[in-house]
Image (tube, grey):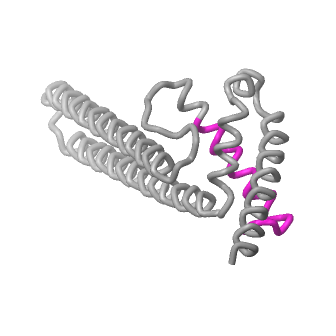
Amino acid sequence: MSMAYLSDAARQQERHYYLLSELQTLVKDLSSSFQQRLSYTTLSDLAQALIDGTVYEIVQGLLDIQHLTEKNLYNQRQKLHSEHRALKQDLLGKHRQALQTCKSHNVAVLKSNQRTETEALEQRVREEQRMMDEKIVAEMDQKVLDQQNTLEKAGVSGFYITTNPQELMMQMNLLELILKLQQKEMVSGTLP
């Protein structure tokens, strides 16, 4: 029993060294400002978290959720854009029809009313687009918080809930390292 434990511990130690070495190599491809902020301890802790491959699965799941969310939000925005285009076309058609049947002495009043209607529709479209964009930003911000929370709970070094732009960039770079290392391990067949 203790021999199996030792060999298992030795395998884990060997994998830790391998992952740490790979991370140190991958870090060299990142910006020097990021390299300076990444301590040996952070890389070692990250390598430790990656030993059993669970974090790879978590990151992949989070990315899948993010991509589905992005696609869904994009489709919602496209649908809104199409609805707005249809509303504008309908209004334009209604205006053309009204102008064709309008008595000449009423044309100036009709055109003024139509301008007011068009401006009101354009204002509505702008407001709905602004609200949609705010919704998209809020949902993506929430996804980031969910990702930070999940990775922090999984014990991935460097991840915690923050909105600090420098820390977010650091976390994005850490995610990039994890994904590159996962890709390398998939290609080389060294995934656990």
Q: Is residue 120 located in the magenta-colored stretch of the structure?
A: no
Image coords of residue 86 (percent x, y):
34, 51
Query: Is residue 190 placed above or below 79 in the rendered structure?
Result: below
Task: Please tell me which residue lies in front, 100 or 73.
Answer: 73
Left or right position of 145 against 31: left
Task: Please tell me which residue is depicted at 76% across the width and 27% down the height of the picture.
Answer: 31
Q: Main secondary structure of the magenta part?
A: helix
Q: Quadrant of the C terminus?
A: bottom right
Q: Which residues are magenta?
A: 171-192
Query: Is residue 126 placed above or below 146 in the rendered structure?
Result: above
Left or right position of 43 against 169: right
Image coords of residue 176 (percent x, y):
68, 44
Image coords of residue 71 (percent x, y):
49, 56
Q: Is residue 176 located in the magenta-colored stretch of the structure?
A: yes
Q: Quadrant of the N terminus?
A: bottom right
Task: Please tell me which residue is depicted at 75% across the width and 74% down the height of the picture.
Answer: 3
Task: Please tell me which residue lies in front, 184 or 119.
Answer: 184
Left or right position of 29 against 33: right
Task: Please tell me which residue lies in front, 174 or 111.
Answer: 174
Query: Is residue 72 placed above or below 108 in the rendered structure?
Result: below
Image coords of residue 63 (percent x, y):
55, 55
Pick out the residue farthest to the front.
2
Pick out the residue farthest to the bottom.
1
Quadrant position of residue 174: top right
Left or right position of 37 against 158: right
Task: Please tell me which residue is depicted at 82% across the width and 69% down the height of the picture.
Answer: 189
